[in-house]
Amino acid sequence: MIDPDLLEIRQAFAIEGAELLTDMESSLLALESNPTSVEDFGRLFRTVHTIKGSASIVRFEAVEHFCHSIEHILVRIRDKELLLNQQLVALLLKCHDNISSVMNQYCASDDEKEIVLPARHSLLLNQLREWVADTHSIEQEQQKYASLDDSYLGLESESDGDGFHFFEDTTEEHLSQPQLQDDVSDEAAAGDMNARKQRVVRVDAARLDQLSDLVVELVTATSVMEANVRMLGDLASTESAMHVANLIKQMQEKTMSFRMIPVQTLFQRFKRIIHDISSSTGKQIKLQISGGETELDKAVAEKLHEPLLHLVRNAIDHGIEMPKERTAHGKHEAGTVHLKAFHDSGNIVIRVSDDGQGINLENVARKAVERGLAKRENISTDKDILSYIFEPGLSTLEDATMLSGRGVGMDVVRKVVESIRGRIDVETDEGVGTTFQISIPLSLSLIDGFMVSLGENLYILPMDLVLETMELPSAERRAAMPNGGLQVRDQLLPCLDLRKVLGITEASPAVQHVVIFRHGGTGVGLVVDRLHGEIKTVIKPLGQLYRSVVCISGASILGDGSIALFLETSKLVEAS
């Protein structure tokens, strides 16, 4: 078995190595479009140098020597003896992929046995040596590298122990701090350096998930405690319970913030994907990112990667045209895929847009009829047509490609989005482009809800969708309204009876209420018995036993031990 101390360093190597590899990849992609960027080249050089030093610390000689070979190339580029062209960037990107693959294999190993290197490892090493030996011998290059000025890297020399500063990052001032001779000065310098240290503690994501789950349970237990204390009627106990509840609320908010990450980390993954697809298809594609600072739950980000990957690939394959075709239609020869994120009413909204040829609605309708998904006379609007692109087995491409065309993908996108209580909408303009919009809750566990009831049964609606409430008009007034409609001031809204939608046969009370919630661009009324108001609660999944239940997305245990069911508003509308 591996030494425990080395295992801990390996774990840090894996975490920070992934971050450095991301920097390496982004630097290379930036240099491909702007090879003269000194800033990007310096970042690339420092990243490769740091990975090499860190591999040395964990005794991973394969990566250490591989990065050393890459540095030979970078030295020659720096000294203007070698031109950084697209061919060389492509080789360095392959080197990045090789380092990533070998590091993953190494960090996943729990013993000291030698890692089996892939065949491409030696192949890439030979290609790197060929670039180095093009005009200089390897011996000459090693002499040149031996005289490399480490100040260019922004790091200490290798003999001083370069590599990761595990668990604590230090500032540049610390790195350049001169050695002091007397003990008093050493103590003062040490105190000063400690004050300047950036205290960063790396915590495994699984531990954060465990902490989050415990806080969620604590919120539920506190609700039960508050309800019991109120029943006792003791003022001092009630005040103490309220104070504890307030502290737990603050703890809950802080804990949830630990899980939030900028959406930029999710969007950045698609730079390389678009680069590779662009190279293989001959299409010229630019990725535009906006709203990257918008934060979302880490669990949500992980769930969204696959749907966004499908949408980006489809935008390139179905939407973006070849350069000649684009110029013939008066467009720029390079197409654009735009990823945008922003917050809206407690949700995070992500848009995937392209400026391609759009979706041919007539073609989609024809395919839907051919596959028996719909009858031609039942398709009346563009929205009806677009809904069929999410059906399994439907594709508008006549021949499958490496990217799409087999009728799988869009149905998976919808299922994944709905599994995290989200929704997906699509807009298209033929010849102009297509936009997919995904709206999902900021957190998968805690939500702000509005509670209602039918008899003894409790239900919760998403608070951000509730527009207003009102008392249900009398039977005489409703008789003057269209069937299934509700007159709200000067507007006629569709109205659903929750009893009929859920199939509840229990008689309704004399006085009922209406909750008006937002659906698409309009409001929809929902008839219920009682209104209980706003509630902050925890959503629990129903489990596989209830997977066929429609209109219900989860449940919550309330303070008094009763259970409330979460209503899926979009499913309510569909079911009615």
Image (cartoon, grey):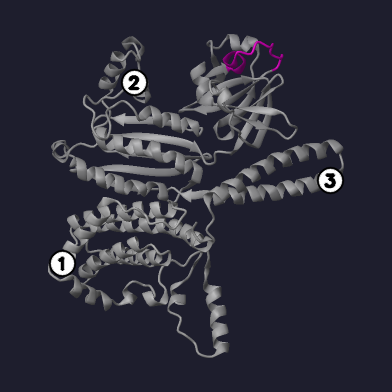
- Say which residue label 2 marks: 385
- Say which residue label 1 marks: 133
Q: CA distance from mark 3 to mark 2?
A: 60 Å
Depth check, mark 3 against mark 1: the one in front is 1
Mark 1 falls on what kind of element?
loop
Q: Nearer the viewer, residue 97 or 458?
A: 97
Q: Position of residue 332 (x, y in %)?
A: 19, 43
Mark 2 falls on what kind of element?
helix
Q: Residue at x 44, y 56 (%)?
A: 14
Q: Please name the amino acid that badge 1 sits on.
A: Ala
From what the image shows, is residue 176 above or below residue 90? below
Q: Residue at x 55, y 87 (%)?
A: 185
Residue stretch rendered in magenta on the structure: 497-511
Left or right: residue 489 versus residue 395 is right
Q: Please name the amino acid that badge 3 sits on.
A: Ser
Mark 3 falls on what kind of element?
helix
Q: Nearer the viewer, residue 344 or 104?
A: 104
Q: Residue at x 46, y 59 (%)?
A: 10
Q: Position of residue 572 (x, y in %)?
A: 53, 21
Give the label on residue 237, or none.
3
